[in-house]
Amino acid sequence: MKTLKIETKHIPKIILAVACIAVAVLCGIKAVKEIKYKEVLPESSVIGLDNVLIIADGGNGTEIPKNTVYAVDDLLSKQFKAIKIDARLTKDKKYVSLADADISDFTDGEGNVSDYNYFDLLEFNIRNFRPNENPVIELVSKTAKHAVSNSISPVIYLHDFNKKAIKELVNEFSQQGISVYAYASDSLKELQYIRKLDSQIELIYQVDEITDEIIEECKKEYNISVCFNSKAKNISVYIEKMNIEEIDYLCHGTKTLKDIEELYKIGVRRFITDTVKAG
């Protein structure tokens, strides 16, 4: 068997070649991770950009932590005009920005948000971020304020119902001059309570399936929109009914530009998604 011999003078070239291959592989991995932002609306011949609103669902989440000021900065560079901020309630009744109730999904901690007081949560860092930067879980008011200061409208999705905490949050926004685009929830009871606190703000009722019962409930409420799942059944039929009743609507769960185009054709103009870049 012949032994492969490498001349000393070729070693630097081999090292350089290996390094180039390694860089190419890493760039490829990064490209795959960021593929969710490769579909850009201006490429569509169907959608009219002037009357479509893409609401980012917390932010990228792959390279930039969702529901943080860093996500807002990232979305600003991608021309988003709105962001959905998930509001989770701590043990001491403070709303923090976190997509999931389980903090281990995004941080180096364990347990649920509701297990900790707010200041205890600050001990945990959000994982997988840039070296030497350790972002922590933020108060919803901080994330929303940063969004507004960058001309990105926040949609506050309230996951946990607590009258006192909701009232404090709404009052804090008012005192700080934070203009919220809308409040969202899967609880009609919660939205009705927010209506008592702010009679003008838009409310978004998030559902999986649209039903006649939901349409009837929304008819009774002023300025309430239905946010339905893109995979819901009989969407076109219910959109026609909501148009008749003058109920606004938007969609969550779209994954591709084609999904958005199909819904656009039947009248949907607002989408909550992170899978398609705004512009």
Image: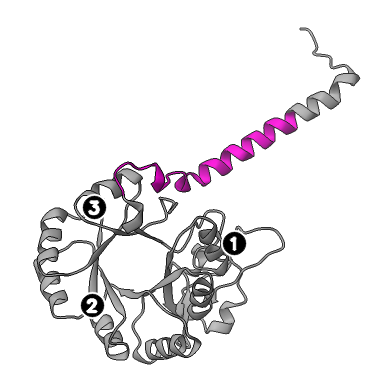
Reading the image, the residue beneath label 1 is 127
Whether residue 138 is situated above or below residue 198 in the rendered picture: above
Q: Nearer the viewer, residue 122 or 139?
A: 139
In the image, residue 140 above or below residue 164:
above
- Residues in magenta, as a range: 18-47
- Badge 1 or badge 3: first in the primary sequence: 1
Q: Is residue 101 visible?
A: no
Q: Which residue is painted at 46% across and 81% down in the image?
A: 178
Local SS, label 3: loop
**If you read the primary sequence from the N terminus, does the residue marked by circle 2 or circle 1 appear first?**
1
Position of residue 253 relative to residue 12, above or below, is below
Q: Nearer the viewer, mark 3 or mark 2?
A: 2
Residue under circle 3?
Answer: 231
Q: Quadrant of residue 174?
A: bottom left
How packed mark 1 is, by other alpha carbons closer than 10 Å (few <14, some 14-19, many 20 or more), is: some
The part of the image, by quadrant, that contains residue 230 is bottom left
Q: Is residue 272 left or right of residue 108?
A: left
Numbered disc in front, either 1 or 3: 3
Q: Are dots 3 and 2 in contact, CB under 8 Å?
A: no
The residue beneath circle 2 is 223
Quadrant (top left, top right, bottom left, bottom right) of the N terminus: top right
| Residue 46 horizontal/vertical position (percent) | 29, 44
Q: Residue furthest front?
A: 50
Give amino acid for label 1: Arg
